[in-house]
Amino acid sequence: MKRALLISLTLFFTTTAAVQLWAELSTVQFSNANKQTDFSALLSSVPPVPPSVRGRYQILQTCDTALNGPFGQLQSTAWRAQIGQHCLITANNILRQTPQFSFAHLIVASAEADRNNINAARAALQSSQTHAPYQAWLIERRIQLQFEAGHLTKEELEGLLLTARGPSILAARYAADPNIRAVILAVLRQISPQSQKRFLDQIKAHAG
């Protein structure tokens, strides 16, 4: 009896380990090869969700590069629609297991924005902000998507101005894009004088 139980447990753990290994190896296929291969894999199928946080970050990073990188920006509407659909499914699959994964919410927002589902994109951005309000690189990425959606929140703008690169990023966008200036100024009026000063100092630096 004990021997049978031991054999059953051994088979169970061996099978579980094999499933996890397959998921991790699939992550390598999607995330560690060259970028063109990554995109080809994403076009053909939805990757499995790996068990490790690192593996999930790798898949999401591949999606982020495909959706927002220079190569992806040059591709056809059909190419972007297929990639976006697979990345949306992937991010939502990850969120079913780890709802607090802010980067996954960001990828949902990016995919929804690419499909012109602005309300869904804004909701996903809000979820990303809720779960990781102070991570500078996520704030920068969310701000970019908020600009694209024509919607800037007070919390994200003030958070951006508190990061090391934030004031210069915002000032550069303000200087380069006249269409976004009214949106930026409307939110700037709502934030603290200290944050306003950081932004104005950078505007002066760009002008000088």
Image (cartoon, rainbow, N blue to C red):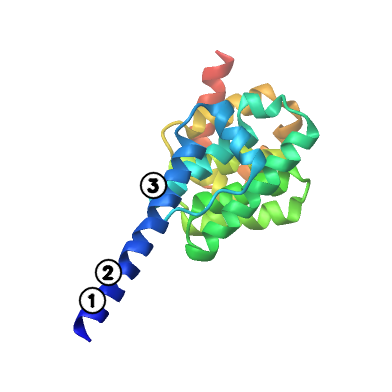
Amino acid of disc 3: Arg
Question: Measuring 70% from the left and 33% from the top, which residue is drawn there?
Answer: 181
Give the residue at mark 3: 54
- Secondary structure under tag 3 reads helix
Question: Percent x, y for residue 104?
Answer: 54, 52
Q: Residue at x 37, y 63 (%)?
A: 15
User: Which amino acid is tagged 1?
Assistant: Leu
Percent coordinates x, y for residue 88 in the rendering: 65, 51
Q: Are marks 1 and 2 in contact (CB under 8 Å)?
A: yes
Disc 1 on helix, strand or loop?
helix
Judging by the rendered image, the residue that carries numbered circle 1 is 6
Which badge, 1 or 3, comes first in the chain's sequence?
A: 1
Which percent across, then down, holds residue 58?
46, 42
User: Quick one: quadrant of the C terminus?
Assistant: top right
Q: Is residue 185 left or right of residue 132?
A: right
How packed mark 2 is, by other alpha carbons closer than 10 Å (few <14, some 14-19, many 20 or more), is few
Residue 150: tell me if it is visible.
Answer: no
The residue located at (61%, 33%) in the rendering is 39
Towards the viewer: 17 or 162: 17
Amino acid, disc 2? Thr
